[in-house]
């Protein structure tokens, strides 16, 4: 396994070999990215400085054709949180990198002028990017693809990343707009004067046991296709009304309990009015991506990727905007500017509440009535955040910093964990989500544990969970959240989409890994690998100052109940769950892994706290 290394300050290119021991300990993807980040950065690293490391990493299954493995991880130190950052993304880029024969890239330094890099089987080449600097992600991708021809896949930043907006993300697949969305990694890329990373491969990855791999993949594809029918038909926004009823949908910056207008934003309505097609990530039989077209609306035309659930939830219900055309336009602008829709929607909701409470005046917003439900204002604020102008320059700092700038009263409605904005799932609706948000290594993240599924209808017999949990009890939640976080870290390191959870078993993953690489792990070693990866990320954060005080939730969702719906009257007893969670993790009362835990995981000799 070989990574390419490049120092953009000097233009020097080299390689880093990954030993068999490291591969077994961290697999690839997020896990291996975390190990490289730990080795190359530290508490003093400035996220926007040339010393920050930007890591692109595929997994051992990426590019092989294993079902739903067309993914890769991007890892760095976060602009928003100052902590460990990772973003997982699908599309075709990771598959194309696998075809070059390289397993990832390690990028340091800062180019003097804008550049992009091209990765082929022959190595990494640096090119002048001034012709696409300043262009949006769609145009940049189109120009670079046209220039380099068939097979090119581009990971690009837009104007937001170039301006180092802390909410900036890294976009893939052109107008299909697959986003490495969270943690501000687009700003890290922009700080390096790096416009794009292109991949163009010709190799087919070697499969250890091709016959077994083919038979397994055929069986699993059928399982996934059958289980994923709703995702294929309606996309991720298809379940919005069930989430509204369960109390999981955030409404009006987590202030409102019910919102019948959510139906106007559903995947079913999107399909009926604007859908022109759907698209798939590499090796995926589902195809949850939405292609839409709106020729005429008050906000302008849209043609490209439609909004996923998180975009609908943040640009829509978070801001009380029920105009689907406005949400589609806001989503399209985020894709073009290269902005995380979750953090952007949350920041705009903060602005709307600040405007309502007169912490922002009409003069502060440049004459824009930043009122709840105002679709035009939401769309314009996306533009201002992307351009880093006007009120958008304030909100684009992220809700934690924007609230600090607005003054102490804004702290009550600044919804984040460790600096990362809450996604479109309310932790009052599922107590496991509350605990998972509080302890996730990158900040508030519904996918870090993906635990709410086990409080609905999902079971995991291999983990001993033979029936769903009650969402409003604490019994067993500490152990369940820890085990699910470990498992999701394994998905992120193998690079398998989490939407297949329930359709694929842990044994399926182990068989896939063995057939692909010949690497044999039993269940216990596999789960311990996930635990090792999670604890390594935790150690990184502790060295950056994280402790129990940071494993918390926003004041609003800890003290203010929803007054209707299934979650009516519920508040997560985080403190009680946190103690049980720390005990399961083998951490002390301050949230630090105990020496014996690090020793058991093979971390003790290298990672002293």
Image (spheres, rainbow, N blue to C red):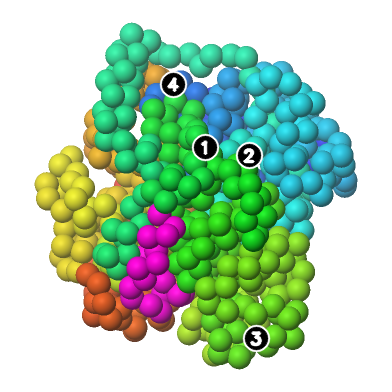
Span shown in magenta:
249-267
Name the chief secondary structure element in magenta: loop
Secondary structure, mark 1, is strand
Q: Is residue 350 left or right of residue 609?
A: right
Circle 3 crowding by C-alpha within 10 Å: few under 14, some 14–19, many from 20: some
Callout in the foreground (3, 1): 1
- Residue 255: in magenta span: yes
Is 276 in front, or is 70? 276
The residues bearing labels 3 and 1 have C-alpha atoms spaced at a distance of 40 Å
Circles 2 and 1 in contact, beta carbons < 8 Å: no
The residue carrying mark 2 is: 175
- Residue 437: in magenta span: no
Q: Is residue 234 above or below residue 538?
A: above
The residues bearing labels 3 and 4 have C-alpha atoms spaced at a distance of 51 Å
Q: Position of residue 215 (x, y in %)?
A: 29, 14
Q: Which mark is residue 276?
A: 1
Circles 2 and 3 in contact, beta carbons < 8 Å: no
Q: Position of residue 332 (x, y in %)?
A: 62, 51
The residues bearing labels 2 and 3 have C-alpha atoms spaced at a distance of 35 Å
For the point 43% across and 34% down, which residue is it? 287
For the point 42% across and 60% down, which residue is it? 264
Residue 12's quadrant in the figure? top right
The residues bearing labels 2 and 1 have C-alpha atoms spaced at a distance of 13 Å
The residue carrying mark 4 is: 65
Q: Which mark is residue 360?
A: 3
For the point 25% across and 72% down, which residue is it? 565
Q: Is residue 10 left or right of residue 279?
A: right
């Amino acid at each position: 396994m070989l990574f390419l290394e490049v120092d953009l300050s000097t233009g020097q290119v080299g390689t880093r070999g990954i030993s068999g021991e490291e591969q077994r300990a961290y697999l690839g993807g997020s896990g291996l990215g975390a190990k490289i980040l730990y080795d190359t950065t530290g508490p003093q690293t400035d996220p926007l400085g040339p010393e920050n490391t930007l890591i692109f990493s595929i997994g051992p299954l990426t590019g092989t054709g294993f079902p739903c493995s067309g993914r890769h991880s991007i890892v760095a130190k976060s602009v928003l949180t100052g902590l460990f950052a990772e973003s997982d993304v699908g599309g075709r880029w990771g598959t194309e990198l696998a075809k070059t024969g390289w397993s990832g890239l390690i990028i340091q330094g800062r180019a003097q002028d804008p550049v992009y890099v091209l990765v082929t089987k022959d190595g990494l080449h640096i090119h002048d990017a001034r012709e696409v600097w300043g262009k949006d992600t769609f145009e940049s991708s189109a120009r670079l693809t046209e220039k380099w021809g068939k097979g090119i896949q581009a990971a690009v930043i837009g104007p937001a990343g170039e301006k180092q907006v802390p909410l900036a993300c890294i976009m893939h697949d052109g107008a299909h707009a697959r986003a490495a969305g969270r943690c501000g990694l687009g700003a890290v890329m922009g700080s390096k004067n790096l416009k794009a990373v292109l991949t163009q491969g010709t190799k087919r990855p070697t499969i250890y046991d091709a016959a077994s791999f083919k038979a397994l993949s055929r069986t699993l594809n059928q399982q996934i296709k059958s289980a994923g029918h709703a995702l294929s038909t309606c996309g991720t926004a298809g379940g919005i009304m069930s989430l509204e009823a369960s109390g999981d949908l955030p409404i009006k910056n987590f202030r409102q309990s019910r919102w019948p207008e959510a139906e106007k934003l559903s995947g079913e309505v999107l399909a009926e009015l604007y859908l022109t097609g759907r698209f798939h990530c590499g090796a995926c039989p589902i195809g949850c991506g939405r292609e839409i077209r709106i020729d005429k609306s008050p906000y302008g035309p849209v043609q490209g990727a439609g909004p996923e659930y998180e975009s609908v939830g943040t640009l829509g219900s978070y801001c009380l905007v029920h105009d689907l055309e406005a949400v589609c336009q806001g989503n399209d602008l985020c894709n073009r500017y290269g902005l995380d829709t979750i953090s952007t929607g949350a920041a705009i909701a903060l602005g709307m509440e600040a405007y309502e409470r007169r912490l922002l005046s009409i003069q502060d917003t440049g004459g824009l009535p930043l009122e709840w439900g105002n679709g035009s204002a939401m769309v314009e604020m996306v533009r201002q955040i992307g351009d880093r102008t006007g009120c958008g320059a304030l909100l684009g700092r992220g809700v934690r910093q924007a609230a600090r700038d607005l003054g102490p009263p804004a702290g009550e409605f600044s919804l984040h964990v460790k600096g990362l904005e809450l996604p479109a799932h309310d932790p009052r609706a599922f107590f496991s989500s509350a605990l998972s948000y509080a302890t996730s290594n990158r900040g508030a993240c519904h996918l870090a544990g993906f635990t709410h599924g086990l409080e609905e209808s999902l079971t995991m017999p291999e983990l001993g969970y033979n029936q769903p949990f009650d969402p409003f009890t604490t019994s067993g939640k500490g152990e369940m959240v820890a085990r699910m976080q470990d498992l999701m870290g394994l998905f992120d390191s193998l690079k398998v989409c989490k939407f297949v959870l329930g359709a694929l078993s842990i044994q399926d993953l182990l068989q896939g890994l063995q057939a692909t690489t010949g690497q044999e792990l039993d269940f216990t070693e596999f789960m311990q690998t996930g635990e090792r990866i999670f604890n390594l990320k935790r150690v990184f954060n502790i060295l950056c100052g994280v402790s129990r005080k940071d494993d918390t939730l926003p004041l609003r969702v800890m003290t203010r109940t929803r007054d209707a719906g299934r979650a009516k009257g519920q508040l997560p007893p985080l403190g009680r769950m946190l103690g049980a969670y720390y005990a399961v993790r083998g951490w002390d009362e301050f949230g630090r892994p105990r020496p014996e835990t690090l020793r058991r995981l093979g971390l003790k000799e290298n990672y002293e706290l």
